[in-house]
Image (cartoon, rainbow, N blue to C red):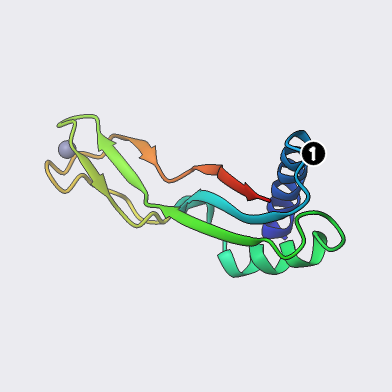
Amino acid sequence: MHELAVTRSILKIVLEHTEKNRSSRVRTIFLKIGELRNLEEDWIQRYFDQISKGSPAENAKIHVTQVPVVFICKLCKKEFSAAFREDTKILCPHCNGFEYDLLSGREFIIEKVEVE
Ligand SMILES: [Zn+2]
């Protein structure tokens, strides 16, 4: 129930936001989610519809921008993207180096909340 826990925390933050801004209704919630988070947009929306009932965030639309997984090679300092799987070894496509840092892909950001 990964998505449900995440959706709960989104709702909590969004409701705090509406309270602070004294707005009565939330229209759209813009999220930025790294691909490594493995979250399904459909499920987030579905859970959100359930748990937001009766709150100012009821019927809000969730918009997700996926952030691709990008590594930076420690050897040649070039960036590359790769499908991340724990059982596969990732090599830098430029120099075959195998030491790298993750630049993006783990994001979980509420970018913007549109209210009325
Ligand atoms: Zn490299």
Looking at the image, is 87 positioned above or below residue 102? below
Classify residue 51 by image quadrant.
bottom right
- Which residue is most to the front? 116
Evaluate whether residue 60 shows in this view.
yes
Quadrant the N terminus occupies: bottom right
Which residue matches tag 1? Answer: 19
Judge from the rendering whether residue 39 lies leftward or rightward of residue 72; answer left or right. right
Rendered location of residue 66, percent (x, y): 44, 55
Residue in the foreground of this view, choosing between 112 and 45: 112
Judge from the rendering whether residue 69 lies leftward or rightward of residue 49; answer left or right. left
The residue located at (37%, 49%) in the rendering is 69
Evaluate whether residue 86 shows in this view.
no
The residue located at (48%, 43%) in the rendering is 106
Residue in the foreground of this view, choosing between 19 and 43: 19
The residue located at (76%, 51%) in the rendering is 8
Rendered location of residue 65, percent (x, y): 46, 55
Classify residue 49 by image quadrant.
bottom right
Amino acid tagged 1: Glu
**Judging from the image, what secondary structure is the residue with disc 1 in?**
helix
Rendered location of residue 28, percent (x, y): 61, 56
Judge from the rendering whether residue 61 lies leftward or rightward of residue 50; answer left or right. left
Residue in the foreground of this view, choosing between 114 and 88: 114
Rendered location of residue 16, percent (x, y): 77, 38
